[in-house]
Image (cartoon, rainbow, N blue to C red):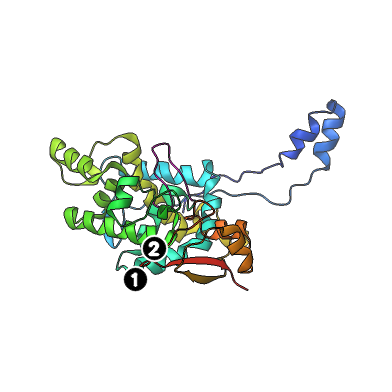
Amino acid sequence: MPKFKPVVLLAGVITLIAAGCNQEEKKEVVEEVKVEKEVHFSMPEIPSSMTFCDQKIDLTKLDAKERLDKELLTNTFYHSSTFQYFKRANRYFGELERILQEENMPDDLKYLSLIESGLTQAVSPSGAKGFWQFMPAASKEYGLTVNREIDERYHIEKSTRAACAYLKNVYAKFEDWPLTAASYNRGVGGIQSDLESQQVDEYMDLYLNRETGRYFFRMLALKLIFESPENYGFHPDEMYLYEPRETRKVNVNKSISDLVQWSIDNGSNYRELKLLNPWILGKTLTVSNTKTYVIELPAK
């Protein structure tokens, strides 16, 4: 495995301290700082192939390795968000993996959610929301309720099952996971049009816009990093990782006019209710005669 030459890192505090000192004082500050260890950066060789969703991905075509290398470098050295990915993944990947397994979908699709939202309840400039970044029209098509009181795009389990339904439909059309994943960004019609106009049948051969061109390679890069974090300088066992929250579930089949009081009556408070149920938008919840909602509260 090739390695960079050892790099000795001096704490940035030296610069901050020395900034207000004269030359003699600066020298004294630097001399007093003892570097405890050297930091070695290493990057594994880019593989010629790997798997994604159990499909072999050929990385020998023209610039494929360079495209993957760019995403590996971005997420390894330039992107402090990767640390947060590890922290949040420790909390949420277990739930996503469970749902994907129940839906008979490949485990690797969790990386699609990771690059879409960073495992946050993100809101895009175009109005896509949640872990899986559903737009309003797609939300309705795949059974997610969106109204003034509820937005189930923020419901992790329901939105994940909706994403599975979408991906199943797209995979049935393309029978190819790179194209299926790319369509999540570009749209099915856009990918189909690109394939036809460019007279190719593989993602690696498509000339795409910058975002979609990077999209699948970002997933491949994060899969490599998460499966072998130490190879890329990450040590999750030494991080403060976010633990899954322990909750209790309360079935609600009657409308609630005051969720603040309801949460207090149920041994919690409104902040905890909103934190654990981001799909609830306001302070009321209207429940029809045929509907039951499940609200999570902290475990007692």
Of residues 96 and 77, the one drawn nearer to the viewer in this rendering: 96
The x and y percentages for residue 43 are: 48, 49
- Which label is found at residue 288? 2
- Give the distance between the C-alpha atoms of the residues marked 1 and 2, in whole angstroms: 28 Å
What is the magenta range? 121-132
Disc with the residue nearer the chain's start (1 vs 2) = 1
Residue 241 in view: no
Report the mark closest to the observer, 1 or 2: 2
Q: Main secondary structure of the magenta part?
A: loop
The x and y percentages for residue 48 are: 31, 52
Q: Is residue 183 left or right of residue 10?
A: left
Query: Mark 1 highlights which residue?
Result: 102
The x and y percentages for residue 119 are: 47, 53
- Which residue shows up at 80% across the image and 35% down it? 17
Of residues 214 and 94, the one drawn nearer to the viewer in this rendering: 94
Element on which disc 2 rests: loop
- Local packing at callout 2 (Cα closer than 10 Å; few below 14, some 14-19, many 20+) is few
